[in-house]
Image (tube, coloured by chain):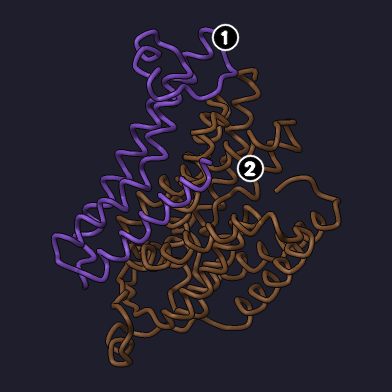
Chain colours: A purple, B brown
Amino acid sequence: MNGQVTLCNVVQPILRWGMVLSLIFMFAGLALGFVTGDQDAGVVPLEEMPSGLMEMDGAAFLTLGIVLLIATPLARVVGSLCVFIKEGDRRFILVSLTVLLAVAVAVLLGGT
Amino acid sequence: MEPLVLLLIALLCMSAGAIGALMGIGGGLIIIPLLTLGFGVPMQEAIGASLIGVIATSTGAASKYVKQGLTNVRLALFLEMSTTVGSIVGALIAVYTNQKVLFILFSMLLVYAAFTMLRRTELLFSPEEVAAEGQMVDLSCRFVDPRSQCEVSYGVKGLKKGLAYSSVAGMLSGLLGVGGGLVKVPVMSVCMCVPLKAAAATSNFMIGVTALTGAIIYYGHGLLNTYLCGAVALGTFTGAYVGTIMMTRYSSGQLRKWFAVLLFVVAFTMVLKALGLWGGA
């Protein structure tokens, strides 16, 4: 039925892996925080994340988990877009692009 | 925050995840008042953590619902067009509107939706019947009901109406910060003839994208408290998993009644909020 199976086979692993990876990093971050006694911290900016991870900073691990979590719904829209492009489903290519564009506009408007 | 407090927050957020996964709502309605009123978390930090919790609920439950076929991915993308655009419009005009009036209007809308959900029984159409009527796009879908093990094949009707109402749902969530799922589930169920379980699963799936923009903005402004977000996300993930199991235990009819009850409760808290008697979401 209208490519339901293919779409699910692409979207489901994206959700599963997004969930598993973000859970692992968040859990590690919380555990590190409890060990070091640091339990109040804002997000680490993206550029400082690699060094934070090397230093076993709990907040950096948590931030990576949060970023992965935020990226998951976005990745599944992109994943669906790829399926529609492969199937040549023009209407749904347009639908997915509109969603991505709306998200981009919302972020740009909200960021200023 | 103390580790024990974070643990308690994670445990309490499980309820938000479970109800969210079962009813197709985000759970911000539970998480925000819980954090602000229960733990004295500042409003902005609470909203940030709630956005992360909503994405966790959506992702956690959807990874299971998509596999079961309960999530209608095409329908979700189709309606996301209008909810995302609606939420941008809502956020832009929020400054010019009277929140109190909006809360009262919103609660009236919820009461109306609750009565419609209670009065009407589920009406389904086969994909062939809907195709014969000629719709904009084919959104038909198929799933195996996790409770009865029956295969359900359904066609989706009323696409224009669905788009129009879900843009209102998006606008409301942009204006008030709540209400996406509460409006989307009745719209899909009543106007578009989507079976309730599929409507809840699809709405739950969509909420991930709705919360996404807010979460990116909060991240960019450094407004997320990492440990609080981590605790809320772990709690809602676990709760969402419990919710997907609960979904297999109840029939659509039972869920429909519960959803109506949920709508009444939320409508009541909205009125309290409009009158200044409730500080939460």
Tell me if I can see residue B180 in this picture: yes
At x 69%, y 37%, the residue is B43
Q: Position of residue B199 (x, y in %)?
A: 45, 67
The outermost residue toward the front is: A112
Q: Nearer the viewer, residue A81 or B127?
A: A81
Q: Residue at x 29, y 39 (%)?
A: A17
- Amino acid bearing label 2: Ile
- Name the image quarter holding residue A26: top left
2 and 1 marks on the same chain: no
What element does badge 1 sit on? loop
Expressed as whole percent of the image width and height from the top left, the position of residue B27 reads: 58, 49
Q: Identify the residue under disc 2.
A: B31
* Depth check, front residue: B146 or B203: B203
Residue B245 visible in this rendered orientation of the protein: no
- Left or right relative to B62: residue B268: right
Bin the neighbour count of mark 2 within 10 Å (Cα to Cα): few under 14, some 14-19, many 20 and up: many
Q: Residue at x 37, y 15 (%)?
A: A53
- Whether B218 is drawn above or below B281: the answer is above
Q: Is residue A106 left or right of residue B119?
A: left
Q: Which residue type does callout 1 highlight?
A: Gly
- Image height check: is B10 above or below A2? above
B33 left or right of A25? Answer: right
A6 or B211: nearer the eye?
B211
Instruction: Locate residue A87: give its quadrant.
Output: bottom left
Give the quadrant of the N terminus of chain B.
Answer: top right
Kindly identify which residue carries mark 1: A37
Q: CA distance from mark 2 to mark 1?
A: 25 Å
| Residue B91 coordinates in the image, percent (x, y) | 59, 55
Q: Position of residue B79 (x, y in %)?
A: 42, 67
